[in-house]
Image (tube, rainbow, N blue to C red):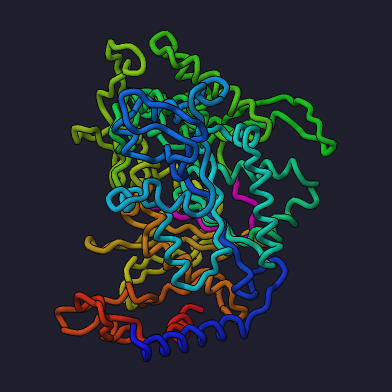
Amino acid sequence: MNGVDRKRRRIAMTLTAVLILGILELGEGELKGDYSKISGIIIPGFASTQLRAWSILDCPYSPLDFNPLDLVWLDTTKLLSAVNCWLKCMILDPYNQTDHPECKSRPDSGLSAITELDPGYITGPLSSVWKEWVKWCIEFGIEANAIIAVPYDWRLSPSMLEERDLYFHKLKLTFETAYKLRGGPSIVFAHSLGNNVFRYFLEWLKLEIAPKQYIQWLDDHIYAYFAVGAPLLGSTETVKALLSGNTFGLPVSEGTARLMFNSFGSSLWMMPFSKYCRADAMYMKHFSGGTRQGHQTYQCEEKEFQSNYSAREIADGTFFKAIEDYDSDSKRTLHQLKKSYHDDPVLNPLTPWDRPPIKNVFCIYGVDSRTEVGYYFAPSGKPYPDNWIITDIIYEVEGSLLSRSGNQVEGNPGATSGDETVPYHSLTWCKNWLGPRVNITRAPQSEHDGSDVQVELNVEHHNEDIVPNMTRSPRVKYITYYEDSESIPGKRTAVWELDKANHRNIVRSPALMRELWLQIWHDIHVDAPSNFVTKAKRGPLRDDDCYWDYGKARCAWPEYCEYRYVFGDVHLGQSCRLRNSSADTLRHYI
C-alpha cells in the first residue's frame, strides 16, 4: 500500500473510531458503551485445543521422542512415526481419568492453543480452527488483550475439569479480570463441546456465589452468549465413536481411535439424550462449603414412552447394560456414566438445556448437510476394540431419513438435516428459547442488495420448531434468522441457521463472522432503532470482500469497492479494495 493509500485508510479508520467512541457511553447491564470496554472470550470445542507433553518419554524404534512442552495434539509427524508412544501421551485411565504412567499431557494456553492444532505449511491450514476468527478481530482493530481464549483439556469429564485443573474457578477469574481490565462485560463465543462446558460453568457458578448475586454477576460480566454448533440434545456420532471408533480423519485404525476415545471421561458428554426426560439436582451445596446429598429423580414425560426407541436408553445406560455380555467395555461406560454424569454434584449434563439466564443469547448452527442419525451394529467376532462393525447407517437428508444404500427409512425426520455432525433436532432445540412471537428473515449468505430477502413478522411460537414458509433458490446459500419480536422480559434471543455450514468449519465462515461483527456494531449504538441489525442489504466490509467482475470489467460492488493497484498485486481481484468509506458503510447497519 503506498503512502497516499495509507493516509486515506488512516483517515477512514479515524472517522470510524470517532463515530464509535464519540456517541457512546457504557450503560449498566447494556452494551451501550465504549467499544474498547468489550472483551471476547472463546471456549473451543472437542479436540480443538492443543495438548502438550509434560513428561520425558523415549520412543523405541523411532528417532522422535516426547519431551516437556512437545506438541502431542496434534503432531501428525509423531503420530505417524511413533503411534504407540503418541497414544501413551493421549489416553487416560478409563476409570479415574489419571494419566498414563509413562506420559502425561496438558492443554496449552493462550490464543495460539486454539488457532491451529498442527502448525505448518501443509498441516496448518488443514488443522485451522479459530485462526480466521482472530484475523477478523485484528482487521477490525480489536486489541490483543480484548480476545481471550480459555482452552481446556477436552478429554476430561466436567467434574474432573474442576477437580484436576480448577478450570471453572479459573474461568470465573477470567471474566472478572476482563471486567477489571477493560471496564465492561464480555461476549462469550463457544463452539461445539465448548457450549456444554459453558453450560456446566453457569450451573457451577450458582453454587459458588450467593443466589441473590448470581444474576447480577452474570449481568455485570457477560453481555451476550453466542452458541455456535451447540449439541443441545447430544450427537448420534458419539455412539459410533464409542462402539466402533471414529478416526476424525486421523491416520489411525478405527479400533485405535475407539481405544483412545473411550479412555476419555468426555466421551459421554455429547451422547444423545431425550428432550422429554429431566433429572433433579443430586446435591445441594451450603455456602459454608459443605454439601448434603438429596434425592435424585429422573422423570420422563408420557411422550417419551410412545416410541420403540429413544435416546433415553443411551443416556440412562439401558442400551449399554443390554450389550454388556457382548462388549467388555460396557462396564467402563456404565461406571463413567454413573460417576461423572448421573451422580455429578453440579449438573447431569445429559438433560435438556433451559435458556441460559443471560440477557442476550444467539444460537447459531449449520443445516442442510447429510448427517448420521442412526446405526446398525453387528458383532465382528474379533476382540475389543474391534468387536463391532457397522452394517448400515441412517442419514437425515433434507427432511428425509435414508439408509446408506439410499432406501427410505421410517421415522420422524426434522424439517431439514443437521450440520454433518449434530442432528437437526439437537441443534434446533434452542428455538424453544425464543419468545412467544418471532420475526423470521431469510437472506443470502453472500453480499446482496436485498432483492432476495424474505420476511415473516410476528410468527406465533409455542416452544417448538419453527419452519418458515419461504422459498429457496437452488444455487444460493441462505441464512435464516429467527429473532424475538416479543421477547421474554429482560431477555433477547436469536437463532441463525446457515445453509451448508458444517460443524467444524462454521467458525471459519465469512458470513458468520460478518454477521457477528455487524450485530455487535449495532448493539453498541444508543441510537439503534431495533433490537437486531437490519438484514435489508449486505455490502463488502473488508478488502477481501471486494473482487473483480469479469463480465462487467470492473470491481464488483462499485458502491463499496474500487480498483486501486498496490505494488505486489498479482491479479485484478487483489487490486479491488474498499473505497475507504468504512464509517459510512457501517452506518447502514445501525
Q: Which residues are magenta?
A: 354-366
Residue 450 magenta-highlighted: no
Which residue of the protein is positioned furthest toward the right in this rendering? 288
Residue 365 magenta-highlighted: yes
Q: Measured along the vertical axis of the image, is residue 198 above or below residue 141?
A: above
Q: Nearer the viewer, residue 550 or 67?
A: 67
Q: Nearer the viewer, residue 433 or 138?
A: 138
Instruction: Give coordinates of residue 410: x percent, y percent.
Output: 30, 32
Which quadrant: the N terminus? bottom left
Give the side of residue 573 with respect to residue 281, left or right.
Answer: left
Which residue of the protein is positioned furthest toward the left in this rendering? 551
Give the side of residue 54 with respect to residue 538, left or right.
Answer: right
The residue that appears at 45% across and 19% down in the rendered structure is 319
Observer able to see residue 415: no
Q: Nearer the viewer, residue 312 or 270?
A: 270
Q: Measured along the vertical axis of the image, is residue 319 above or below residue 538?
A: above
Q: Measured along the vertical axis of the image, is residue 321 above or below residue 115?
A: above
The residue that appears at 22% across and 62% down in the rendered structure is 475
The residue that appears at 29% across and 44% down in the rendered structure is 370
How many numbered tags mark residues here?
A: 0
Hey, which quadrant is residue 574 in on the image? bottom left
Instruction: Give coordinates of residue 408: x percent, y percent.
Output: 23, 35
Instruction: Give coordinates of residue 297: x percent, y percent.
Output: 66, 26
Observer able to see residue 176: yes
Q: Nearer the viewer, residue 384 or 60?
A: 60
Instruction: Give coordinates of residue 343: x percent, y percent.
Output: 64, 25
